[in-house]
């Protein structure tokens, strides 16, 4: 996930979280707070962060951490608080994870719940939506006058270099280029059993139709080559005829069914990204929906768990393939692998207490599983956690 709200797109993935878990040594502070974009008074963002900083310092003191160590752990957050410009360029949420000797800060394109926790490990729950909703997607803005291929996340957008990708920038450029393909064939027509696809414009001459067909073939060839082998969703932004023409020729399995209708020429890159987002969101959340259905389908088989001690035991054995985490859930206590949960409560009460929900998330990820963050009404069980097991 980028530490800047604009610029070159970077993504947060499961390997990043695993590295964070391995690097951060206890005690670890996790601060999370909602922020506001482009606010007239950015000090409001900083004020919220200062409040969470105080709670984190108090929690460290309560955990027996000395003043010098408290200041060292919170030094990077203090440096951010001293940077007024930083707070003027926020997204919708911020998570800061700190330990003695290191920290990570993430600006997120979604709201997070306020928290300031001290534990044996980083609390990754606020970062889990970034794994599904922070994924990249592409938007192909297609018109005869202009072609744009945009690489996007929910909060960022950048243009793919068309010349480097071998994609014509317009119909005029495609027609002028020396096309090595026979003029009466396209990708699907040339394939075994493929039907010849001819584009017919409204009221256009046969010559115009052939030009448009050549244009579409060239665009499809470049886009298919550029995105081949990726799992990145692609959303079209085009008038109906061009969208249908592209769809008939492409071999990309990642092309979304719905598209952004109408000419994209007068829409800025950011507008196209935002218009495509509702389409992409459904695609990116498909693994979550599948995991919920798997949990429901496997109930009663021993492969769908929701009791916290059972989930923790299964996670410690590497059995959990997918962990579903209820938003805001925290259960503090102690867990001993092979023995089970020795205590479970709503808040830390003893020196060795840890957030058992955060422990389940960390253990699942470190064993190569997935973890998703769900609203309470999305959970397949009335519990803080629900696990789908491998065996």
Image (spheres, grey):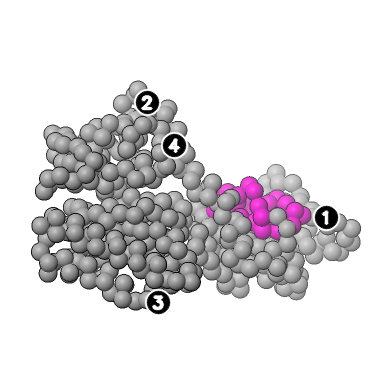
Which one is in front in this view, the residue at disc 4 or the one at disc 2? 4
Which one is in front in this view, the residue at disc 2 or the one at disc 3? 3
**Cα gap from disc 4 to disc 3, whole angstroms:** 38 Å
Q: Earlier in the sequence, mark 4 or mark 3?
A: 3
Q: Which residue is mark 3?
A: 85
Q: Which residues are magenta?
A: 233-260
**Position of 74 relative to 117 (above/below):** below
Q: State which quadrant residue 44 falls in.
A: bottom left
Q: Which residue is mark 2?
A: 299
Residue ID at (36%, 41%): 326
SS for dot 4: helix
The residue nearer to you, when weighing 111 against 246, is: 111
Question: Pointer 3 and pointer 1: residues touching (CB < 8 Å)?
Answer: no
How many neighbours does mark 4 have within 10 angstroms: few (below 14), some (14-19), or many (20 or more)?
A: few
The residue nearer to you, when weighing 187 against 153, is: 153
Q: Earlier in the sequence, mark 2 or mark 3?
A: 3
**Cα gap from disc 4 to disc 2, whole angstroms:** 18 Å
Residue ID at (47%, 66%): 37
Q: Earlier in the sequence, mark 4 or mark 2?
A: 2
Q: Is residue 259 magenta?
A: yes
How many neighbours does mark 2 have within 10 angstroms: few (below 14), some (14-19), or many (20 or more)?
A: some
């Amino acid at each position: 996930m980028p530490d800047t709200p604009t610029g070159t797109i970077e993504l947060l993935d499961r390997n990043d979280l695993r590295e964070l878990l391995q690097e951060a040594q206890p005690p670890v502070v996790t601060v999370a707070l909602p922020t506001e974009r482009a606010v007239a008074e950015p000090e409001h963002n900083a004020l919220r962060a200062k409040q969470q900083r105080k709670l984190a310092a108090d929690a460290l003191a309560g955990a027996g951490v000395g003043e010098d160590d408290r200041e060292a752990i919170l030094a990077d957050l203090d440096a951010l608080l001293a940077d007024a410009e930083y707070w003027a360029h926020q997204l919708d949420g911020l998570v800061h994870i700190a330990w003695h000797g290191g920290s990570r800060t993430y600006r997120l394109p979604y709201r997070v719940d306020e928290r300031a926790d001290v534990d044996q490990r980083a609390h990754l729950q606020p970062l889990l939506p970034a794994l599904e909703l922070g994924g990249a997607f592409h938007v192909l803005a297609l018109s005869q006058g202009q072609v744009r291929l945009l690489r996007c996340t929910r909060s960022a957008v950048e243009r793919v270099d068309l010349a480097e990708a071998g994609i014509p920038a317009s119909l005029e450029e495609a027609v002028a280029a020396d096309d090595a393909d026979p003029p009466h064939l396209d990708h699907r027509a040339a394939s075994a059993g493929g039907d010849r696809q001819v584009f017919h414009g409204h009221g256009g001459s046969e010559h115009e139709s052939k030009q448009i067909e050549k244009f579409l073939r060239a665009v499809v060839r470049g886009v298919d080559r550029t995105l081949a082998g990726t799992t990145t969703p692609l959303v079209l932004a085009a008038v109906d005829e061009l969208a249908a023409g592209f769809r008939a020729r492409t071999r990309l399995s990642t092309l979304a069914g719905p598209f952004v209708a109408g000419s994209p020429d007068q829409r800025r890159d950011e507008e196209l990204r935002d218009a495509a987002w509702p389409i992409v969101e459904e695609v990116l959340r498909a693994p979550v929906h599948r995991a919920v259905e798997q949990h429901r389908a496997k109930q009663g088989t021993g492969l769908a768990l929701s009791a916290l001690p059972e989930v923790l035991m299964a996670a410690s054995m590497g059995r959990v393939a997918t962990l579903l985490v209820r938003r805001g859930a925290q259960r503090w206590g102690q867990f001993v692998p092979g023995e089970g949960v020795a205590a479970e409560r709503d808040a830390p009460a003893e020196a060795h207490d840890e957030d058992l929900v955060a422990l389940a998330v960390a253990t699942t990820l470190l064993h190569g599983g997935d973890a998703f963050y769900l609203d309470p009404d999305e959970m397949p069980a009335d519990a803080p956690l629900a696990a789908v097991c491998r065996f």
